[in-house]
Amino acid sequence: MALAPDPRTAALLREAVQLHRTGRLEEAEAAYHRALDRDRGSPQILQMLGLVVRERGRAAEALDFFRRALELDPENFHSHYQLAQTHHRLGELASALAAYLEAFRINGTHSGLLVNMGSALNALGRPSDAVPLYQTAIRLEPALPEAHANLGNALAALDRLPEARAAIERGIGLAPDNPRFRANLGSCLLRAGAMEEARVAFAACLERSPGDVTALAMSASLANETGDTATRDRLLDFDRLLDFSELGAPAGYSSAAEFNAALSAAVLGHPTLAWEPGDHTTVAGQQTGSLLEQPEPVFEALRDRIEARVRSYRDARSADGDPCPPPGAWRIDMWATVLREGGHQVPHIHPSGWLSGVCYPACPFPANDPSQQGWIEFGRPPPAYAFQTPPAVRRVEPREGLLVLFPSWFYHCTVPFAGEHPRISIAFDVVPHPPGGKAEADRQNSD
């Protein structure tokens, strides 16, 4: 789309784009707003504002800019595509897929779109629908590494393991330094029972990216299976790496009970609370989107408590010898889960985090329950890998006001919950990110 014809608006837009490209995001956002003040009818400026706002961590706000751009220019491919990617980032996969399909209607030969739409379909449990999209992307752009690697992930989900391995290896051949592809290869090899080859793949991933969460998680499970107890115990040092504290009562709350009640009410009333969202691990329960996208005092107070505890956790543990040294800078991503009768979380990790955690505003079950229903369990890998050796696990009893920190590579799940009243938990990731920022490329995820 051409720049706005007014010379002053065009100059402001050029300034904003230059600031954006050089990572000066706060200044870029202000410059885009100055340009928009002069030309309220510019879909281009609205689209660029959406991009910079999303890069600054306000993805939900970015949705509004992309929607406004589409009201002015309904057939704009890039606005549909960016809207889709933003929904995808927020975990709103049904909305993401709808927007991807609109973009595809306008331009079905954009390889990045095909890869990302395939990623959404794969996350929605539709790998058979994702496969032809990846194959089309490869025909259009044979040297696109993400298309090959993601095709392999979809084929692995369909248990077409020899084809999956070949596809991921093609991705590695095109991008040999991409650690994620090697972690995906290791996971595929584990599914196929090729333990030693999987170990080599995970080691190659960790050589390139020492903190890769998937490789650390699977290395721990693999070490347990092969009898390498030294590696297993280093990676799953529950006594050292689990951290427990009490939330207490932040300023403005007379007691911890009042704070927990306010958190529970805010979760149950949250507009994003949805039953078994497509890409999540919740069974017989509800989950929210991000709790920090829109300002809400109770969640901001919780974030501040979490930030303080994370700093204490970091300071209390030397980086020397840690499987994943702490980052210099991070952000907090936070969401909530509400479990009903029979509700539970299947074993999973948090690949984007360095540290993860959970707190419990409401735990409606008796203390010291011998059934351990609703407890959180660490160390058990997903059943898809069919390990024969019992895993080393640690179960923790939730209680109202408890805050638990754990490394993001710890597989964790919940014992199915049985209770008349909902079990409410708020989970979060401590996501490493560099200071400043830079303009984004297409996601082209490795699933």
Image (spheres, rainbow, N blue to C red):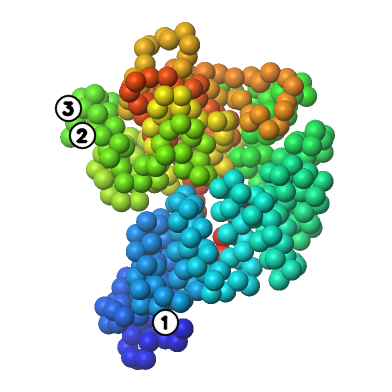
Residue found at x 53% / y 64%: 101
Query: Residue 409, located in which quarter of the rendered image?
Result: top right
Q: The disc labelled 3 sits on which kind of residue? A: Ser
Residue 292 in the image: above or below residue 318 = below
Q: The disc labelled 1 sits on which kind of residue? A: Arg
Q: The disc labelled 2 sits on which kind of residue? A: Ala
Q: Which of marks 3 and 1 is nearer the N terminus?
A: 1
Residue found at x 51% / y 41%: 280
Residue 17 is at least partly visible in this image? yes
Task: Give whichever of 70, 62 is nearer the camera.
Answer: 70
Residue found at x 64% / y 19%: 392
Disc 2 to disc 1, how far (Cα)? 45 Å
The x, y position of residue 173, in whole percent, is 79, 58
Q: Is mark 1 on a helix, strand or loop?
A: helix
Image position of 219 (left or right of 409): right
Q: Residue 254 carries which label?
A: 3
Label 2: which residue?
251
The x, y position of residue 282, in whole percent, is 48, 35
Task: Give whichever of 206, 402 is nearer the camera.
Answer: 402
Residue found at x 63% / y 43%: 212
Label 1: which residue?
14
* Nearer the camera: disc 3 or disc 2: 3
The x, y position of residue 94, in whole percent, is 48, 53
